Amino acid sequence: MLSFLSFFFILIADAINQLSNASSDGTTNLLAFFRLIAVFCFFQMATKYRLKNAIPDPSLLIFKLLMAWSLFSYVRGIFTADGYFDWKYLLLSETFQMLIPLTIITGIHFETTKKTFLFIFNILFIVGFIFIPYSTSTDTEFFSRLVAIVYVIMVLIPYLKLKWRIVTIIVATISFLIDISYRSNLLHISISTSLVILFYSRYIINIKAIYNPLLVILFCMPLVFVALGATGQFNIFQADISSLGLDIDTSNDNNIKSNLNDDSRTFLYEEVTNSMNYRDSSYIIGEGPTSGYISPFFWDSLSEEKIGIRRNSEVGFLNTLLHSGSIGVGLYGLMLFNAAFLAINRSNNYLCKLFGFFLISRWLFFFMEDIVLFNMNYYGIWLVVGLCLSKKFRLLTDTQVRQFLILK
């Protein structure tokens, strides 16, 4: 029940947050209340379900180091907070963002997620259809954000009963079609679809021999591109990918045209790094969670007491680098890599292998978007991390996984 309640209240908070953004209705206290309930459930689960012996000792050490470093950065924020908006962000945003990795418990003790999966299929995906008119008329991203857990559920398709496969495919298709200019949603659905294709083609194309090389290449790829971009040798965001079919003009509800091939990230990298260089910030430990960065591009729209300072960018990597430095980035990356490696090399079921590549794909997205938030997106990421680390889940056979996912 605790696992389900944590999921439910994060979902409700997500929905309210998205609705309040569309209506400009302040709901800060309500969001904090629901998120506090979810955190309370996490702590209750932490006392009830121990991590020791449930996951490998090295993995537990990495997780503890990640949480300890997050706490260290948070304490720095306490001492550097200056004014109302700093304290508001620290208490009502950073507190929860720091704790979202606790979702790992629900994955490690996966037996507790049965009720959550039942809720997703029987209620969330079905009730979600009610909000399609609202999404098409008011907020085109609302439906996609409401059912964001579908990115994870899609990977389960080979193991689900036929009716739940159909429902999942319908939900994912509608999520995609409602707003094809929502690039991150398009990419996430594409990755999950690719993983399902990989499952069904495993007997046709035997690529087990390249799993580990591919794992290492995908993990190192964004680091290489960041280095190439920083030295001015190559900018992946300005590469011409129109030949891939992404040179498509779209428009949103406000008739603002965009192109799926547009570069909306280079200037963010430039602004954050220029800001850190200007303030002589440490790339090792960062500036703390209340720092923000100097943003000439958004200067006119920034109205907090720190004129010209933007709290966060749209890129998870940049925010983590700014707030907790390369140590924070490294620990997060190490957590994902360790879970992916175990899933691919130390598991008896193919689902773990798919989830391993799912996590590496999220590492890639971390350098393009994936802002760390206390939301369904990161709930899904840390749920999968927990599943990949769980000794018990990795020991299951494909048949046993299917039996677990027989939902009534």
Image (spheres, rainbow, N blue to C red):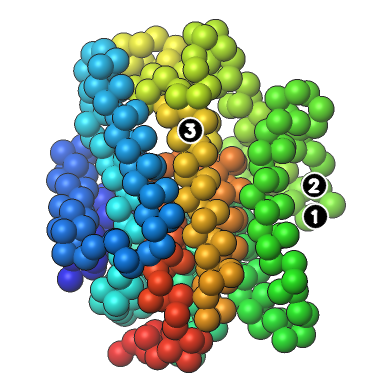
Q: Amino acid at mark 2?
A: Ile
- The CA span between labels 2 and 3 is 32 Å
How crowded is the residue under tag 2: few (<14 C-alpha within 10 Å), some, or many (20+)? some
What residue is pinned by disc 1? Answer: 244
Seen in the picture, residue 222 relative to 161 is either above or below; the reply is above
Residue at 71% x, 81% y: name it. 201
Seen in the picture, residue 120 relative to 58 is either above or below; the reply is below
Q: Secondary structure at mark 1?
A: helix
Instruction: Spot the residue most to the right.
Output: 243
Mark 2 or mark 3: which is in front? 3
Q: Amino acid at mark 3?
A: Ile
Q: Where in the figure is residue 51, as x and y percent of width and height?
A: 29, 61
Q: Nearer the viewer, residue 162 or 91?
A: 91
What residue is pinned by disc 3? Answer: 327
Q: Quadrant of the N terminus?
A: bottom left
Residue at 37% x, 54% y: name it. 60
Q: Amino acid at mark 1?
A: Leu
What residue is pinned by disc 2? Answer: 241
Residue 177 visible here: no
Residue at 43% x, 29% y: name it. 324
Q: Are marks 2 and 1 in contact (CB under 8 Å)?
A: yes
How crowded is the residue under tag 1: few (<14 C-alpha within 10 Å), some, or many (20+)? few
- The CA span between labels 2 and 1 is 6 Å
